[in-house]
Image: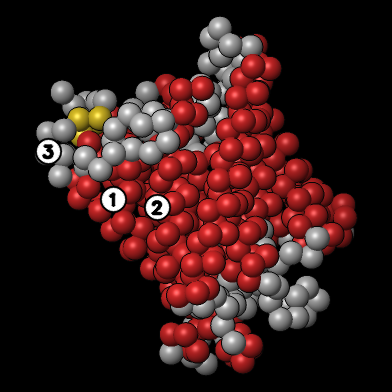
C-alpha cells in the first residue's frame, strides 16, 4: 500500500520544513531586530510552533482536509479520531501527510511575526496566531488543497504561494498598520544587530525550502526533482538581482540585501515550483527579486508603514507574483508541465481570482481577529516597555549577558 521511497522523502521533507521555522525563521528574524528584542522574536516563533501544532491536531487538519465542502471541511477527523495507523494518503501514510501539512500550519502564522516585532504583547501573539490559524489559514488551505471551491476552479498553487504567502503577507500588512509604527520609525531605528545571524537563518530557510516545495509533490519522483531545481535557481537569481540593485543604488552590496533577495526568490517560485521548468525558475527569480525590492521601498518609504521585516513586500507580493507567473511559465513552450485544454489567459484569470479572494478574506478576518485580541488581551506594549526591550520586560531574560 505504501511506497517506502515516497514515505522516506516526505518524512525528510517534514523535518526540513520544521527546520524552516525552528530555528531558520527564528534566527532570520532574530538577527534583524535590535539586540534587546532578540529573545522575544525567538519566543514568538517557538510558541507559535507549539500552539499551531496542537491546534492543527485538535481541529485544523480535519477542517482543512476532511469532507467535501466548498468552503470548509468537516469535523470527522478532530483529534485524528478517524485516522488509523494504516490510513493512507496516496502512496504515503496519512500520519506522514498530517505531519507534513502541520509544518506548513506552523510556519505560516510565524511569518507574520516579522510585521509586529518589538512592540506587541506576548499574549496578543498567542491569541492572534491561534485565531488566525483557524479562521484564515485553515479555510484557505481547504479552498486550494482540500478540494474546496478554488481547487474546483483549477487554481495552480503547488506549495503555497496563495495558501501560505498571500495569506501571511496580507495579514502582516493589516496588523502592522493596526499596531502603528515603532517609536522612532523610520529614521531612529537601529540597524539589524546581527547580520551574520540573518544569513544563517536564511541559509536554513533556503535548504528547508527544498522540503517545502519538492516535498509538496508528495512523492520522490520527477516532479519533486524539478521543483527542487527551480527552487534553487529562483533563490540564487533573485539574490543576485537584489545584490545588483543595491550595488548600483548605494555603491555597496549588503549581506542582508542578498539574503532578503533569496527569500523573495523562494517565495515567488513556491506556487509555480511543481509546474515549471528551469527557465521558469530563472524568470521567477528575476521578476520576484525586482518586484519585491521595489515593494519594500514602496511600503516603508512612500507609505511609511512599519511592516518591520518586510513580510508583505517579500512574502505577500512574492507569492502573488509567482501565482500569476505560473499561468505562463507552466506552458509546454516554457518547458512546463502544460495547462491541458486551458489557455494561459484563462488560467491567469483563475489565478487572479484566487489571489483576490484570498486577499480579501485575509484582510477582513484579520481585522476581526485584531479587534477581538485588542479587547481581550490588548495589542501593543507600553512605550516604556518598548524602549527597554521586550526580552526583559516580557520574558525576564536577555539575549546577551555581557
Location of residue 69 in the rendering, given as x and y in whole percent from the top left corner: 36, 31
Q: How far apart in space, not on screen, are marks 1 and 3 (Cα)? A: 17 Å
Which of the two labelled residues, at mark 1 and mark 3, occupies the earlier sequence position? 1
**Residue 262 as seen in the image, left or right of residue 83:** right
Q: Kindly indicate the quadrant of the structure image that contains residue 62.
A: top left
The numbered disc on residue 219 is none
Is there CB contact under 8 Å for labels 2 and 1? yes
Return the residue at label 1.
Answer: 59
Q: Kindly indicate the quadrant of the structure image that contains residue 223.
A: top left
Give SS at disc 2: helix
| Residue at 31% across, 56% down | 55
Q: How far apart in space, not on screen, are marks 2 and 3 (Cα)? A: 24 Å
| Nearer to us: label 2 or label 3 | 2
Q: Kindly indicate the quadrant of the structure image that contains residue 383.
A: bottom right
Is there any visible trace of residue 233 in the rendered image?
Answer: no
Return the residue at label 3.
Answer: 84
Location of residue 73 in the rendering, given as x and y in whole percent from the top left corner: 33, 38
**Residue 129 as seen in the image, left or right of residue 30:** left
Location of residue 289 in the rendering, given as x and y in whole percent from the top left corner: 71, 43
Q: How far apart in space, not on screen, are marks 2 and 1 (Cα)? A: 8 Å
Nearer the observer, 287 or 134: 134
Give SS at disc 1: helix
Return the residue at label 2.
Answer: 134
Up the image or down, 390 lies above or below 354; here it is: below
Give SS at disc 3: loop
Amino acid at each position: 500500500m505504501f511506497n517506502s521511497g515516497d514515505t522516506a522523502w516526505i518524512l525528510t521533507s517534514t523535518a526540513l520544513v520544521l527546520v524552516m521555522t525552528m530555528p531558520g525563521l527564528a534566527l532570520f528574524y532574530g538577527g534583524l531586530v535590535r539586540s534587546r528584542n532578540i529573545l522575544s522574536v525567538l519566543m514568538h516563533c517557538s510558541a507559535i510552533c507549539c500552539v499551531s501544532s496542537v491546534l492543527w491536531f485538535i481541529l485544523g487538519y480535519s477542517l482543512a482536509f476532511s469532507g467535501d465542502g466548498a468552503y470548509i471541511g468537516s469535523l470527522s477527523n478532530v483529534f485524528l479520531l478517524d485516522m488509523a495507523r494504516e490510513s493512507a494518503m496516496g502512496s504515503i501514510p496519512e500520519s506522514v501527510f498530517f505531519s507534513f501539512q502541520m509544518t506548513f500550519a506552523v510556519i505560516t502564522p510565524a511569518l507574520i511575526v516579522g510585521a509586529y516585532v518589538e512592540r506587541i504583547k506576548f499574549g496578543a501573539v498567542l491569541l492572534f496566531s491561534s485565531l488566525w490559524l483557524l479562521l484564515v489559514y485553515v479555510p484557505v488551505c481547504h479552498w486550494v488543497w482540500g478540494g474546496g471551491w478554488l481547487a474546483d476552479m483549477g487554481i495552480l498553487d503547488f506549495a503555497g504561494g496563495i495558501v501560505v504567502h498571500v495569506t501571511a503577507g496580507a495579514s502582516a500588512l493589516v496588523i502592522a498598520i493596526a499596531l502603528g509604527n515603532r517609536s522612532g520609525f523610520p529614521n531612529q531605528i537601529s540597524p539589524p544587530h546581527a547580520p551574520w545571524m540573518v544569513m544563517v537563518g536564511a541559509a536554513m530557510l533556503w535548504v528547508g525550502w527544498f522540503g517545502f516545495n519538492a516535498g509538496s509533490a508528495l512523492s520522490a519522483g520527477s516532479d519533486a526533482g524539478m521543483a527542487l531545481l527551480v527552487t534553487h535557481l529562483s533563490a540564487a537569481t533573485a539574490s543576485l538581482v537584489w545584490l545588483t540593485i543595491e550595488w548600483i543604488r548605494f555603491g555597496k552590496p549588503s549581506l542582508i540585501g542578498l539574503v532578503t533577495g533569496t527569500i523573495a526568490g523562494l517565495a515567488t517560485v513556491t506556487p509555480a515550483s511543481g509546474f515549471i521548468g528551469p527557465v521558469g525558475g530563472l524568470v521567477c527569480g528575476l521578476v520576484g527579486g525586482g518586484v519585491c525590492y521595489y515593494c519594500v521601498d514602496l511600503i516603508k518609504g512612500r507609505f511609511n508603514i512599519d511592516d518591520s521585516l518586510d513580510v508583505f513586500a517579500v512574502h505577500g507580493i512574492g507569492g502573488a507574483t509567482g501565482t500569476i507567473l505560473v499561468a505562463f511559465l507552466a506552458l509546454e513552450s516554457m518547458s512546463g508541465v502544460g495547462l491541458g485544454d486551458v489557455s494561459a489567459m484563462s488560467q491567469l484569470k483563475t489565478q487572479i481570482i484566487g489571489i483576490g479572494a484570498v486577499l480579501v478574506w485575509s484582510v477582513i478576518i484579520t481585522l476581526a481577529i485584531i479587534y477581538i485580541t485588542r479587547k481581550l488581551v490588548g495589542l501593543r506594549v507600553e512605550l516604556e516597555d518598548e524602549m527597554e526591550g521586550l526580552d526583559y520586560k516580557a520574558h525576564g531574560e536577555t539575549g546577551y549577558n555581557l
